[in-house]
């Protein structure tokens, strides 16, 4: 899912939480919103590493080209995993869930991350691209050895 949809859906999700819990501290609301968007920073880090440039626009170009490549491969029946994004793994979500025991901020980060990941899952399912992502950090590590 592209960043602008995450920004819009994250804002709506945060607004819904604010509607149901109007007394919730605005810092926690901001934390949920930022977590629902900034989890995609791993996409930026991955692209910047691959193209060896820090330019956000170049990284967006990288994903535009990569999406075209994936579409062509899908039409040819090729279904390979795409880039690895560590913040989107089950293990990273679990780590944040554990840290939320120690700090309420991590709990709200976790809420934002779960919302983001659910949006990604629905998007990947709707586009028949669920196979592109590695969901487990340890699978990624295992495949390297
Ligand atoms: Zn994402």
Image (cartoon, helix red, strand yellow):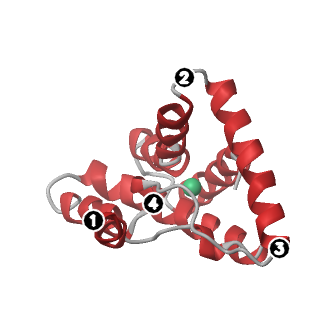
**Marks 3 and 4, how far apart in space?**
27 Å
How many neighbours does mark 4 have within 10 angstroms: few (below 14), some (14-19), or many (20 or more)?
A: many
Q: Residue at x 76, y 44 (%)?
A: 65
Dot 4: element: helix
Whether residues under marks 2 and 4 lie with C-beta atoms below 8 angstroms apart, the answer is no
Q: Which mark is residue 97?
A: 1
Query: Which residue in the protein does label 3 denote?
Result: 76
Whether residues under marks 1 and 2 lie with C-beta atoms below 8 angstroms apart, the answer is no
Dot 2: element: loop
**Camera-nearest label, 1 or 4:** 4
Rendering quarter of residue 92? bottom left
Q: Position of residue 119 (x, y in %)?
A: 63, 65
How many neighbours does mark 2 have within 10 angstroms: few (below 14), some (14-19), or many (20 or more)?
A: few
**Camera-nearest label, 3 or 4:** 3
Q: Is residue 143 visible?
A: yes
Q: Position of residue 64 (x, y in %)?
A: 76, 43
Q: Quadrant of the N terminus?
A: bottom right
Q: Is mark 4 within 8 Å of ligand 1?
A: yes
Q: Is residue 30 above or below residue 77?
A: above
The answer to whether residue 65 is left or right of residue 20 is right
Q: Earlier in the sequence, mark 1 or mark 2?
A: 2
**Camera-nearest label, 2 or 4:** 2
Q: Position of residue 128 (x, y in %)?
A: 75, 77
The answer to whether residue 136 is left or right of residue 100 is right
Q: Quadrant of the C terminus?
A: bottom left
Q: Residue at x 27, y 65 (%)?
A: 97
Query: Which residue in the protein does label 4 denote?
Result: 88
Q: Earlier in the sequence, mark 3 or mark 4?
A: 3
Query: Which residue in the protein does label 2 denote?
Result: 53
**Marks 1 and 3, how far apart in space?**
40 Å
Q: Position of residue 96 (x, y in %)?
A: 28, 59
Q: Is residue 83 above or below residue 48?
A: below
């Amino acid at each position: 899912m592209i960043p602008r949809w995450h920004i819009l859906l994250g804002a709506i999700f945060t607004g819904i939480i604010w509607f149901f819990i109007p007394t919730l501290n605005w810092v926690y609301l901001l934390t949920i919103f930022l977590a629902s968007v900034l989890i995609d920073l791993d996409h930026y880090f991955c692209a910047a590493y691959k193209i060896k440039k820090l330019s956000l626009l170049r990284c967006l170009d990288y994903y535009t080209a990569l999406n075209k490549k994936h579409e062509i491969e899908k039409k040819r029946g090729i279904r390979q995993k795409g880039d690895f994004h560590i913040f989107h793994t089950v293990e990273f979500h679990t780590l944040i869930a554990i840290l939320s025991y120690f700090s309420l901020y991590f709990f709200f980060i976790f809420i934002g991350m779960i919302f983001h990941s659910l949006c990604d899952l629905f998007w990947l399912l709707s586009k028949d691209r669920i196979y592109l992502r590695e969901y487990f950090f340890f699978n990624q590590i295992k495949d390297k050895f």
